[in-house]
Amino acid sequence: MPYVNLQITKGATRTQKAEIVKEFTQTLVRVLGKNPQNTHIVIQEIEREDWGHAGELVADKAAVDKAPASPGKA
């Protein structure tokens, strides 16, 4: 019984999640010969403020990336 626990930052649409579940299931069937009826995919959405990467909160990095460039900087 395959069980996949996927953690992503919040923001995926229901359509995107459905596609993820379909694709992951198809991959387990194709690669490992698993029965799709016994395959479980869980998607856990994590708030950006609760996710860190490279020593920073993802939410803080996203805010910096979206900030307009200072004059004179490319």
Image (cartoon, helix red, strand yellow):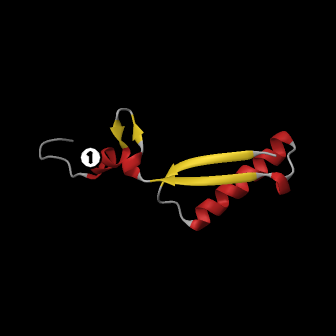
Query: Tag 1's secondary structure?
Result: helix
Foreground pick, 70 / 62 = 62
* Apparent side of residue 74 relative to residue 18 in the rendered image (left or right): left
Looking at the image, residue 29 sits to the left or right of residue 7; the answer is right
Q: Position of residue 44 (x, y in %)?
A: 56, 53
The residue at 84%/57% (across/down) is: 37
The residue depicted at 69 percent of the width and 56 percent of the height is 21
Q: Could you tell me the amino acid type at mark 1?
A: Val
Q: Tell me what residue is drawn at x 64 percent, y 47 percent.
A: 5
Image location of residue 57, percent across then percent down: 35, 42
- Looking at the picture, does residue 56 appear above or below residue 44? above
Residue 31: % across, % down: 81, 40
The percent coordinates of residue 2 (x first, y second) are: 78, 45
Identify the residue position indicated by label 1 in the image.
Answer: 64
| Outermost top residue | 55
User: Relative to residue 55, is residue 37 drawn left or right?
Assistant: right
How many numbered badges does the structure rendering display?
Answer: 1
Residue shown at the point (42%, 44%) measured from the top left: 51
Query: In this rendering, would 66 be left or right of 46?
Result: left
Spot the residue most to the bottom: 14
Which quadrant is the C terminus positioned in?
top left
Quarter-wise, where is residue 55 in the image?
top left
Q: Mark 1 packing: few (<14 Cα in 10 Å), some, or many (20+)?
A: few
In which quarter of the view is residue 32 placed? top right
